[in-house]
Amino acid sequence: MALAAACASKAVAISLKHAPDDLDLKAALASFAKIPQSALANADGDSVAFEEFMRSGTPTAINELVREGEDMAELIARLGSQLDQIEPRIRANMMGDLSAARSLIDAARSIQQRNEGEALRRR
């Protein structure tokens, strides 16, 4: 997620050089700067939940692991939605960076869905 946010940030930053008054791009850049910290905090919570799940395997531990996965899914969806909103404002020469961000989001989504599916099967 951090790398996806970095790719998106680069596309926005370069586009902002050509449209410095674009408030939507400025807001997106500020939002993207928060993604790595949010992703790391989520990863920490997921790690604790996974450890408890492995240790106890209780329904409560499984539910907490699923909840952590849902939090990550929300972060993934939010970043994807933000990319959709700003894409028309991104300079053509920066679309490769936006495409890379989308590919990384897809990879994060795939991992999250697989992990959540495994946890749900153990309910």
Image (spheres, grey):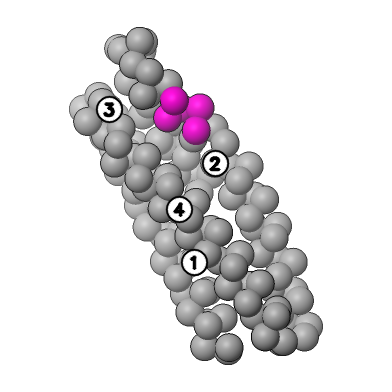
Q: Horizontal placement of 21 versus 76: left or right?
A: left
Q: Is residue 52 magenta?
A: no
* Secondary structure predominantly adopted by residues drawn in magenta: helix
Q: Please, what is the three-letter code of the amino acid marked with disc 1? A: Gln
Question: What separation in Å lies between label 2 and label 4 (alpha carbons)?
Answer: 9 Å
User: Which of disc 1 and disc 2 is earlier in sequence?
Assistant: 2
Residue in the foreground of this view, choosing between 71 and 103: 71
Secondary structure of the residue carrying tag 3 is: loop
Question: What separation in Å lies between label 2 and label 3 (alpha carbons)?
Answer: 19 Å
Note whether 77 is above or below 89 in the view shown. below
Which label was assigned to residue 76?
A: 4
User: Which of disc 4 and disc 2 is earlier in sequence?
Assistant: 2
User: Which of disc 4 and disc 3 is earlier in sequence?
Assistant: 4
Which label was assigned to residue 112?
A: 1
Numbered disc in front, either 3 or 4: 4
Residue beneath label 3, please?
90
Q: Horizontal placement of 120 versus 13: left or right?
A: right
Query: Badge 3 local density, few (<14 within 10 Å), some, or many (20+)?
Result: many
Q: Please, what is the three-letter code of the amino acid marked with disc 2? A: Ile
Q: At which x and y percent is residue 111?
A: 47, 67
Which label was assigned to residue 35?
A: 2
Q: At which x and y percent is residue 49?
A: 70, 70
Residue in the foreground of this view, choosing between 34 and 92: 34
**Quarter occupied by residue 11:** top left
Q: What is the magenta range?
A: 27-31
Identified at 52% across, 74% down, the residue is 115
Identified at 30% across, 36% down, the residue is 85
User: Which of disc 1 and disc 4 is earlier in sequence?
Assistant: 4
Which label was assigned to residue 38?
A: none
